[in-house]
Amino acid sequence: MLAAPVWHFWIGAALVAVAVLAVIGLGGYYLWSVQAKKYPTGRQARHRDL
């Protein structure tokens, strides 16, 4: 039972790291998708000009 708090700490640290990476990833995806609509490239830009 002496090692139980140590394992809890590392599981908590891993969950926090995953949560932070998920928030950063979702924020990056949101910004990317917003910018893609604002500045279309390729076929999207040609279609928009028609």
Image (cartoon, rainbow, N blue to C red):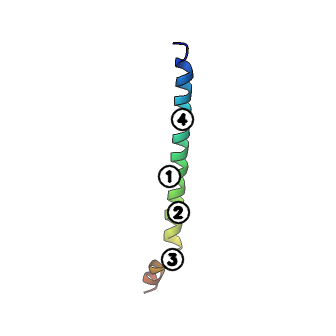
**Residue receiving disc 1:** 26
In three-dimensional space, the C-alpha distance between marks 4 and 1, rounded to whole angstroms, equals: 18 Å
Determine whether 5 is above or below 30 in the image: above
At 53% from the left and 24% from the top, the residue drawn is 7
Q: Which mark is residue 32?
A: 2
Q: Amino acid at mark 3?
A: Thr
How far from the left and from the top, in percent, is residue 24? Answer: 55, 49
In three-dimensional space, the C-alpha distance between marks 1 and 3, rounded to whole angstroms, equals: 22 Å
In three-dimensional space, the C-alpha distance between marks 4 and 3, rounded to whole angstroms, equals: 38 Å
Q: Are marks 1 and 2 in contact (CB under 8 Å)?
A: no
**Residue receiving disc 4:** 14
46 displayed left or right of 13: left
- Which of disc 1 and disc 4 is earlier in sequence? 4
- Which of disc 3 and disc 4 is earlier in sequence? 4
Label 3 element class? loop
- Which of disc 4 and disc 2 is earlier in sequence? 4
How far from the left and from the top, in percent, is residue 26? Answer: 50, 52
In which image quadrant can residue 47 be found?
bottom left
**Residue receiving disc 3:** 41
For the residues carrying marks 2 and 4, which lies nearer the camera in this image? Answer: 4
- Which of disc 2 and disc 1 is earlier in sequence? 1
In three-dimensional space, the C-alpha distance between marks 1 and 2, rounded to whole angstroms, equals: 10 Å
Q: Amino acid at mark 2?
A: Trp
